Amino acid sequence: MKDLKRMMSLVLTLAMCMALCTTAFASESEPLPLADTQYNSDSKRYYGTGNCSYTAYSTLYAGSDRYRASAWIQTINGQNVPAGYMGANGRLFSPSGSLLKATGMLYNTASYYFVVATMSNSVYSGNGAYSQGKIEYFNGDHFDSDELYKTETIPASRAFLADQLQDGKYSVNRNGKTYGSILLKEATGYEPSLISAVGTEGQEGYVRREDLQGPEIRTPEEAVAYMQTRPESYTIPLYDLQERVIGEFEIGGVMEISGCTLEEAKALAASGTGSSAAQLTGQTMLVNGGYPRNSQGQTYGNHLMAQELGYEADLQAAVGTEGQEGYVRREDLQGPEIRTPEEAVAYMKTRPDSWKIPLYDLQGNVIGEFEIGGAMKISGCTLEEAKALVASAQ
């Protein structure tokens, strides 16, 4: 029973450590089956403002002849960064370097520690596919951007790509515009004016570089504002070599991934299904942008919802000592108000090892108890000794 109580107490503690995840967007077509193979590129490391640094990589999800792509950026130490500080753009390419799909740049809209831009639906490519994402991060003055490493699932050979160059340079159409695969940037050091792509009807053509770039984002505030008005998907013209419009290329297509941990986001991206914080935790959804209320007028919800709304509910989701799901009152969790170091020392002298508070159902009826405390006592040792004690749980 003691172990069970400790475990139940730990459940709420862990839940309160979770934060909001950002939004991810998707392309259209048929959903990928769950048994797809995942391929990650090598990671890149970046240094942002202050002591914050990031790592980022591309991911390809491959199933038979259908593919999806993701781009990931996360803080290395897991610390949250302010809203609008990170962005990611998932991009999928054919083996010859033609762009198949792109999510467009997506930024974190709340303080968090990672962003994922993933395609919810798969794209057919009979010859295979690459994933090579792009990221942006705020360095305190402006945004830095970079292309991530590409995955090596079914890569077009370097020799195949090199054949598209003329003396190491892009070919030029009769209007003086360079054209070719965006992957040739590795060899040329720059992107062509016309980037080879596949349209919504499967036709091969080119998109203009400036059409792919989207609006210039200069500050985190502009990034957040952009995300608030960014459409779920939009199209840009697809051209032939002479820049005659022959179709459309789609950017975006929304797959929402929010209110989850990084590992949960990875699982959702791999499965091709989106979910909100409430769906992941088995709790309720927000109502009109706020907490729902019970018949007593009390707000209720989980801590993930609190991270999104910026304040806690009156009744907070918890798991009781007997494993029952319910709610605890916010004021019961807060404990006494400590104003000075002296009060803190006095409190610690009389603080019990553990204590219980009521567990309620949604209507305020007591259905059990929730335990607080049960902490290990560690004193008179070095930091390394304390780490060892915690690891061994002695």
Image: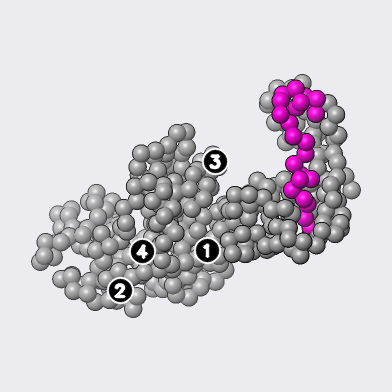
Disc 2 target residue: 248
Disc 4 target residue: 93
Instruction: Give the extent of the magenta segment.
Output: 323-348
Mark 1 → mark 3, Cα distance in angstroms: 22 Å
**Label 3: which secondary element:** loop
Q: Residue 380 appears at what percent x and percent y?
A: 77, 21
Q: Residue 127 appears at what percent x and percent y?
A: 37, 70
Quadrant in the picture for residue 183: bottom left
Q: Is residue 371 left or right of residue 20?
A: right
Disc 1 target residue: 256
Q: Given contact means CB atoms under 8 Å apart, are the residues at marks 2 and 4 in contact?
A: no
Q: Residue 189 appears at what percent x and percent y?
A: 24, 49
Q: Amino acid at mark 1?
A: Glu
- Select label 2 or label 4 by which is in front: 2
- Dot 2 alpha-carbon crowd within 10 angstroms: few under 14, some 14 to 19, many 20 or more: many
**Label 4: which secondary element:** strand
Tell me which numbered mark, 1 or 4, is placed earlier along the sequence. Answer: 4
**Can you see residue 312?**
yes
- Dot 4 alpha-carbon crowd within 10 angstroms: few under 14, some 14 to 19, many 20 or more: many
Look at the picture and state if 154 lies above or below 333: below
| Quadrant including the C terminus | top right
**Label 2: which secondary element:** strand
Mark 2 → mark 4, Cα distance in angstroms: 16 Å
**Can you see residue 41?**
no
Quadrant in the picture for residue 123: bottom left
Q: Residue 4 appears at what percent x and percent y?
A: 84, 49
Tell me which numbered mark, 2 or 1, is placed earlier along the sequence. Answer: 2
Quadrant in the picture for residue 389: top right
The residue sitting at the front extreme is: 297
